[in-house]
Image (tube, rainbow, N blue to C red):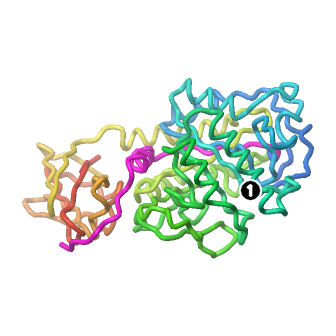
Amino acid sequence: MTKTKLALPTPQQMAWQDLELGMFFHFGINTYCDQEWGEGTDSPELFNPAQLDAGQWIRTAKVAGFKYVILTAKHHDGFCLWPTKTTDYSVKSSPWKNGQGDVVREVADACREEGMLLGLYVSPWDRNAACYSDPAAYDDFYAEQLTELLTGYGSLVEVWFDGAGSEGRQYDWPRIIGLVKQHQPDAMIFNMGAPTIRWVGNEDGVAPYPCWNTAESARVSMFTSDMNTWMEATPEWVPAECDVPIRARHWFWHPNDESSLHSLDHLIDLYYRSVGHGTTLLLNVSPDDRGLLPDCDVERVQEFGTEIRRRFGQCIAETTGAGMEVVLDLGEKQAIEHVIAMEDIAYGERVRAYVVEARVDGEWKTVAQGSAIGHKKIDRIEPLETASIRLRIIECMEEPMIRRLAVY
């Protein structure tokens, strides 16, 4: 056992890591242009969701077991889904609700009604803003937009700063992060400035293993190998979030794209390789041009939630413990195929190597092994019958604190 100073999470980070499943909503002017990245020149007249129902979005997420949602309040094209005072390039210039609508408000209200946590994506890159070429002027512009969102829609669980398009650009991050800290001190900050959570580094929904909760940098975007230069105020504990679209290749809705919908088996595999590796999974499900989540996407999301509950909704047995060995007595022989271990990360990430053993025919048999446990490690094992499971720590930094050892 090695003693060293370990990075520790904040209470807000621990609460966020327990959420595990989030749903991303990419929605905006791109939805009406069959494109992923607009140039900031598409007419606001195109934005007109005749059946927009944010309640349908949030209920879909809730029923499937998702705990938070992220909405693209402003994507790279600069079109704002709220009636900002900073620009006319927003819903107020659209025919939707005669320019009186506010998508952010409707999503925030639906979240409040359903008990769902809300986060907002606010692209730093803006292809419409005339002042973008003047860094000082744009910093003022962006700070005003951000302040509107941070102060006008209730509590936020996360603020999502996408690095795409901003490679090499320096924004006034001390000012931006200061606004988040001032107005939404409990919100997670994604990947830029002084982040409290980081991008996993791909858009496949997959975390590498091990995926440690400590980091000093992360990739800026999909379009560069460059790493972020974070502010000195960035904590050492920066857990990862895995984002992925439910339709391969596309974040925004596109017509006649149903064939790219990921299979249930693929989504379950992503769950094992994200949540099962100790990260959160942020699954994008895009509203269509009606303003509704498409039926086939909703069905797939519900299938996903049902299957997760089938596998992990009711454990056979569980325990907690401290030290180099934790034994779970099942009482009698039971058929098991999953072992879940969780550290009490309030004390840091202490485990560096472990084995899981099952008592079979009077002897301990190794059924799984690994390095990181962290927030959560899900081990799929060959199905077997046993009355006893043992988690044995091989290497650690200080005494292991096991929050939960469970079998399914």
Give x and y (percent) for residue 105: 68, 30
Span shown in magenta: 1-29
Residue pointed to by mark 1: 139
Q: Secondary structure at mark 1?
A: helix
Q: Is residue 96 left or right of residue 284?
A: right
Tell me, yes or no, if residue 339 can be seen here: no
Using the rendered view, name the quadrant where residue 348 is placed.
bottom left
Question: At 74% from the left edge and 56% from the top edge, which residue is drawn?
Answer: 139
Residue at figure coordinates x 73%, y 45% from the top left: 145
Whether residue 314 is situated above or below residue 123 in the rendered picture = above
Q: Compared to 237, does 290 lie above or below?
A: above
Residue 404 lies, with reference to residue 60, above or below; the image says: below
Closest to the observer, 159 or 387: 159
| Picture coordinates of residue 256, whole percent (x, y) | 79, 46
Residue type pointed to by label 1: Asp
Image coords of residue 295 (percent x, y)? 67, 34
Q: Is residue 297 magenta?
A: no
Residue 247 falls left or right of residue 392: right
